[in-house]
Structures are given as C-alpha cells and as structure tokens.
Amino acid sequence: MALALAGCASSVPTTDAPSSIPPSPTALATWARTAGGTWATVAMGHLDHPLDTFWQLLHRPLGAVAWTDEVEPTATATNGGLVLATSPPDDVAVGILPSYDLTFTPIVSTANSGHSWSAGLFDHEMVPAPNAFAIGPGGRALAIAARGRHGDEVFTSMVDLSSWKPLVTASVLDSAPHAAACSPRGISAVGFVRGTVVIGAACARPGRAGLFTDHAEDLAFVGPHLSPPLSHDLVAVLGLDPVRTGLVALLGLSGHHQTELIASWTADGTSWQDSLPLHVAHGQRLVSYGPTAGGGIFALLAGRKGDQQLDTVGEPAGTWHPLPAPPPDTATIAYPTGGGANALAVHGTVLTVWQLLPASDRPASDRWSEIQVLHVPIQFGSSNP
C-alpha cells in the first residue's frame, strides 16, 4: 500500500481539505501471536510477477527457535494473499484470498497450534486488507466482502466459519448517528474489543477517524476528532490490531503537503487516545504494520530505492521511536515470545530471519543478527491459467 495523495478523490466541499482520501491497505505481510506460538504471512517467489508470487503461512511454535513453512492446510500455494485472524488463547483462522475469477474465500482454522485444522468458507471475495478478518469471543467472526460498485460489506458468523450473514454495509455506516462528521467511504478493517464489534473506514470529511462500534446491533460513530494542525487532514483507518489493553488502530492522514501515521488505542471501543504523528516522507510506502510485544504498534516503511525504516510507538500521546534499519527485503516484523523482534526478509524462495534483542539486552552498537535461513520450495509456473 502506498500512502500517496493520489486516487480516491473526494468531492466533499471544504475550504481546507485535501483533494484525496488515504487509500485503504492491500494484502500486506503481517504477524500474530497466540498462546501456542507465533504466526506470520509473507509473499515469496517472483514478487514482480503476480502468477509467480506465492503467499506463505509461517509458524514458530512456542519454545521453538526457528520458523517453519510446513503448515499443512496452506501447503498449496496461493497467489491471492493470506489474512490472519486470532483470538485468545489459541484460535487462529486464515482467509485464503481468491485469485483469477474465484468469487469465494476458503478459510482454515485451528484451536491447538496447528495440530489439527478445520475448513470453512466465506462465500464472497474477502477484501485484500490485513484486518479484513477478525475472530472474537465465543468464536464469533467478522469479514469484509468486496461488493464492487455497491461498496464493501461486513458479514458475521456466529456458529462456524461457513455460515455468514450480512451485518453492516457502507451505506448503513453513513446513516449511523453523527456519521455525517465522517462521511465514510469504504470499509477497511474490523476487530473486537471486549466483545464489541469495531469497524474502520476512510472519512471523506477532514479531521475525523472513521471508527464505528456495533454493540448489540446499536451502531455508533465513535471516531475521535483530531486536534490542530491535523484537523484539516483526511483520515483512513488502515488497521485494527488486538493488544493486551484492548485494540490499537493505525490511522493514515493525508494533508495538502504531507502524509502521516497515528496510532490510536481503546479499551472499550468508545474512547480513543492518539499517539503523536509519524511523518511519511514523499515516495515512501507502508510495507507492513502490526502490534509490538509491549502493546504498541510498529510501522515498516520503504523508500523508492528500497531503503527501509522501522518505527514503533507504545502508548497514547507517545512519540514514535526509530529502531535500527531492518535488513534489506524485510517483509514484516514479528515478536515471538521471549525472542525479541524478528525481521522476516524475503528474497525469491529464501526467507532469512533476523533478530533484534530488546533495548535493555543489546549494546548500543548492536544491530540485527541473522538467526535462520529457510529455503521454501516453490513451483514456478504452476499458477498459469
């Protein structure tokens, strides 16, 4: 996803608003942790050729020191992307995004760290966004379907991952109380906090974050109002990730001459507290984002020449802190239990894992250390129609 100021034009009249909305994310490499281990998704192969780009599900079991791609349900490669969803203590579900002319999304899930798997089916095209799929208490699930010219729609599953019913459409969001302050355009993320459904969207009006709750079918707009000088920026909710204190949202802001990222935390879905902004330089794109081990969030950015930048923020009103620049070709960052930060770098069919120890455990001169090289067998040409 490029955090650019092009595309998604807005016609909302305002004297200070920019002429575009930050774009919603596309399939990105990401990670999640459960009681039984750590999971990650990365794209491998020839990344400049869609038919030879294959998404891999990786697993590092609790207590292990190495990652593995030997995850049985996703052994068959997919070009469309993988979307992770987790719920405590050990529930993991993976949406296998459709490619070619497929119009449905297979789902695989496990509740015991991958020792056994169940199959499900989302009978729609899941939106290719990192947080388009979520699992909540009691196994309830949410998924965003791409509905073409009719806008996106959120579906919910109460019983299993094959029985879905409509929950919210983009037009319904627009009719929620106080939603006129946002004028939502598209649905980009879903999540749960204390059993309450949280929905993220882009706003066509400046200064408000497109955050909605749906508690007991009572839909409400809860997005915070950004303070000056950011109150004239357009805001898109790029992601919603569960953390130990509740939920953290990643917001993308587009102004006349700048693009910025803000993290926003909630413990109940109603009250949100923001970080200070992180400036995104001209030409940079967002490679990956996700929660940190301490309940914060990281943002991995890349410049036009491939140079990468990694920043984290850990608390409301906090400042983003740069970490040592990750190794070349880093696809995402993961935080295995007790293992420090892991950078998962992809070059063709080779995954290299690098480790950065917590700041309290590493010398000031220390940088990323290579800890694993994994060769992933990929059959190029197998996806040709």
Image (cartoon, rainbow, N blue to C red):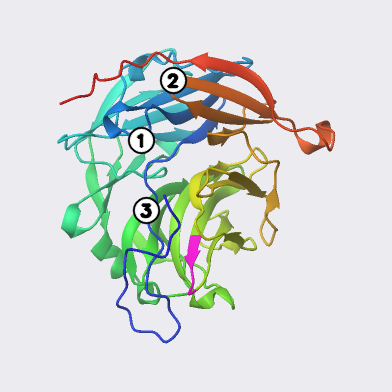
Answer above or below: position of 308 versus 119: below
Question: Left of 173 or right of it: where is 360?
Answer: right
Q: Position of residue 366 (x, y in %)?
A: 79, 32
Report the amino acid beneath label 1. Asp
Q: Nearer the viewer, residue 371 or 197?
A: 371
Sort mark 3 into few (<14), some (14-19) or many (20+) by Cα contacts within 10 Å.
many
Question: Left of 37 or right of it: where is 380?
Answer: left
Q: Residue at x 84, y 38 (%)?
A: 364
Residue 372 is drawn in which quadrant?
top right
Magenta-drawn segment = 252-256
Q: CA distance from mark 1 to mark 3?
A: 25 Å
Q: Which residue lies under the disc numbered 3?
A: 188
Q: Which mark is residue 48?
A: 1
- Label 3: state its secondary structure: strand
Q: Residue at x 70, y 58 (%)?
A: 319
Q: Which residue lies under the disc numbered 2?
A: 349
Q: Position of residue 127 (x, y in %)?
A: 30, 45
Q: CA distance from mark 3 to mark 2?
A: 30 Å
Is residue 126 visible in this depiction of the protein?
A: yes
